[in-house]
Amino acid sequence: MSVTGERLQPTLFERSRPGRGGGKIPHPPADALDRIPAAARRTRPPALPELNEPDVVRHYVNLSQLNYAVDTGFYPLGSCTMKFNPKLNEWAARLPGFANLHPLVPDALAQGTLDLLWSLEGSLAEIGGMDAVTLQPAAGAQGELTGILMIRAYHRARGDTDRSEVLVPDSSHGTNPATASMAGFRTVTIPSAADGGVDLDAFRAALGPRTAAVMITNPSTLGLFERRIGELLREVHAVGALAYMDGANLNAILGRFKPGEAGFDVMHFNVHKTFSTPHGGGGPGAGPVGVRATLAPFLPGPRVLREADGTFRLERPGERPTSIGRLRSFVGNTGVLVRAWTYIAAHGASGLREVSDDAVLAANYLKARLAGAYDIPYDRPCKHEFVASAATIRRETGVRTLDIAKRLIDHGFHPPTIYFPLITEEGMLIEPTETESIETLDAFAEALIEIAAEAYKAPELVTGAPHTAPVRRLDEATAARQPNLRWRPMAGAETPCPD
Amino acid sequence: MPYGPHTAEARERMLRTIGVPDVEALFADIPGELRASALRLPGPVPELELAARLEALAARNRTDLASFLGAGVYRHWTPPAVDQLLLRGEWYTAYTPYQPEVSQGTLQSIYEYESLLAELTGLDVVSASHYDGAAATAEAALMACRQTRRERVLVSRGVHRHYRETLATYFGGGGLLAEEIPLVVGGPDAGTTDLVALERRLADGDRPVAAVVAAQPNVLGLLEPMAEIGRLAHTAGALFVAVVEPVSLAVLAPPGSYGADIAAGEGQPLGIAPQYGGPYLGILATSDALVRQIPGRLVGMTTDLDGRRAFVMTMRAREQDIRRDRAASNICTNQALLALAASIYLATIGPHGLRDVAAGGAARATALETALSAAGAPRLHPGPYLNEFAIRVPDAPDVHRRLLDRGILAGVPLADLEPDDADLEDGLLVCATEVTTEAEIERFAAALRIELAAARSRETAAVR
């Protein structure tokens, strides 16, 4: 299997030549492993590829060039979007004092990082209108699990044990219902109303003594602010349930709406979306969780504590028995949190408000520019993202949203998120983010308008796209039916160590 | 806003196109009574000043001591190629590679990661990454419960306490039960999983066991009888989950060779900096038989319309964005950039280099054991170990503090790591890797000798 296109690359395994590479690590003495019993030893060395460094460097540089990235162009992927990742943040996270710090050093040796984490907790609490924050969760979905487990612990602590349901609108992220299930709850799906908000009647009908929590993404995955949120939260609390806010779209409302002030009991922050961190094709992230004081006793441990003398320390094991426990090893994704702290400090209160202003301005501008060429199912001011639909185009030309997305690649852009949320016909969820200039937004709008015209003039041009990418459309059915998930080892791997 | 793009003229033109007088109008849908109070945050701080503040904060961390810390996070030599390649902006996507035609670089790199870790673990299927070793272990246990339709798992206390706590938290919601298996006290097997207790717990209780979870090497650095633990698990119809350290797999038997159904582990040692706890890399591997149960993303090889080889995310029906409340897990964001780091690390040092890392650590550990034993702190347990072991030191936490004053980070006091285990309170868990120098070992031994002598004379004085 060595069929590759012009720019495609052989795998590491195909590049491998037994005897190549080495020399990075001194050879240990021959008796280094003598104390390891034979039964515990590896009998056949792992057939890892053997390459010299120039080979490796070329491999990864060439692979990187097969990617479309935020640093190479406009990437309007709605719903889960990393924005520009300031280079200062990368520099900061790599400062040796941060990068080389072992997580089990005594607190006295980690005062710089602990100070930063404590201060970040404070900033996030202020931004979310919450009383306390944990930085431990490694991603938004883990933050959701943290929040829902705290809600469970809260009800249990009050002896309120019959609450077995979590209400989730159908416009939510898939992580919400998956999280509720993982925490042992039954998910009750609430439909959306015609205006894109939660259907309040359906919501009321589902709410009751069995409701443990409601999970709401606000603004929703349609990019719409939930206008009746105040009323909704009052009703949630009236039946004794708690309200969870999925903060994945927080970049739309910084300084404008504080979930805690509005009545949400718990929320997570996708700091890697709102406050920058490089997503290398899916992560890493961090998902701090903010809570009102009622839930603070249940926060996972260890928390960062500030002593009377101004020094910082981590909570000791068992110090707070009401804690739900820990979600992962050590403190959290500190390297990501250094970037978030840096982003927040660089912007300050006024800058964060401008982030939201510019994100919302860009989304509404793009929406206005596309209004003639595409359907706009929810025609009211959107927040940081909006849904456009190719339903009419499909009806009239047969060209689908998927085709339009692929054709955008030929026009030099990364496609938006498509067919999400699932409730929109032929939907495209477009999130321009706050750092894109009007020239970029115009060029993207013109490309989409041009593609709409192409759909009528030359539909096969669109349905056959992409024409310029390294590969054409992929056979995903075979990939799923006959999965090939790993390279099989090469012959000749058992070669002596090269010197 | 330091990264903002708009001129006043552009802003004006955008507002005109939208048809609103100002940006404020775009927030009219937030009802008045829900408007936020003023945001009270310092800043904005210009980049020049911010850099100085960050340097000052980083400088308050002490990373210059001779360190013998391990316990789940290990210092290794990382070839500079790893970070330089990782810094290439082309890897920085906005999210998941949903459009494979313009994501072949990321997708191929993930496929290669899956292949490299499959080879290291001796298993067939590796997920595109989890949050860290602890979360991966918890997911492995959940996976075993789904597969066996059983609700009880047995976890050896040789598994890192953070991992056990994480597993307990993940189990805390539903009807699942996690029970701990003690370690042997005394004798030649001291500090390893108590097989007699394991066998008894497998047999008793009114709920059958879904999985047995054990670590190799275990948290005390000791080698466990993995094949025997796996045999006991399988005899009871349970799956066997092995928690492994990836560098050790260059020289230790891989989980696939001793019958593990699932392997979980922490990928941090593969070229990832300690960074006070993360981001790290959760490794999760399993056999073909369990592929439908593995949570998280998978990338597979396929072809495009022209028959060219290409890579794509696959078997996505298990994932939360499609199956929602019936998904294999809620994981969405993973640690893809760290998986890339691990792949570049493995490719750069190669199979022989990895063996040199593992064996080099073992050699340094031997030297460390010899030196510390001569200084008066023998090993706490007699069994074989790889590069980490516990030493017996009277009043260990106090001695640890005194050594710190002498510039030595003398490992981890077991009283901190395992506070409820009285057998370990006199223990320090110390670790050596290929970067540990002979000079550091000598300094540690010399300082320890002095502190133990001082402690003895204090004791004598107190008796008088």
Image (cartoon, rainbow, N blue to C red):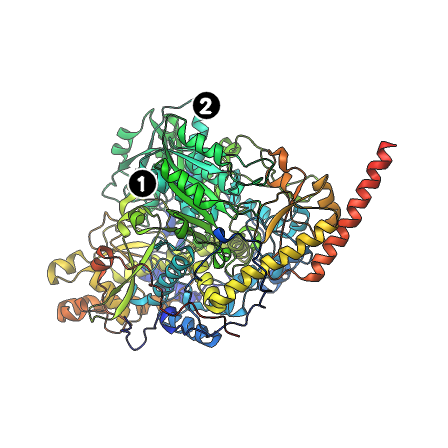
Q: In front: B422, or A73?
A: B422
Q: In front: A473, or A390?
A: A473
- For residue B414, side relative to residue A489 (left or right): right
- For residue A342, side relative to residue B12 (left or right): right
* One can see residue A261 in this view: no
Residue at image coords 46%, 47%: B243
On screen, residue A240 above or below B125 = above
Question: Would you call the spot at circle 2 few (<14 residues within 10 Å), some (14-19), or many (20 or more)?
Answer: few
Quadrant hosting residue A485: bottom left
On screen, residue B114 above or below A3 = above
User: What residue is shown with label 2?
Assistant: A158
The disc labelled 2 sits on which kind of residue? Arg
The disc labelled 1 sits on which kind of residue? Gln
Chain where mark 1 sits: B
* One can see residue B290 in this view: yes
Identify the element where label 1 is drawn. helix
Q: In front: B78, or B94?
A: B78
Identify the element where label 2 is drawn. loop
Q: Position of residue B85 (x, y in %)?
A: 47, 69
Chain where mark 2 sits: A
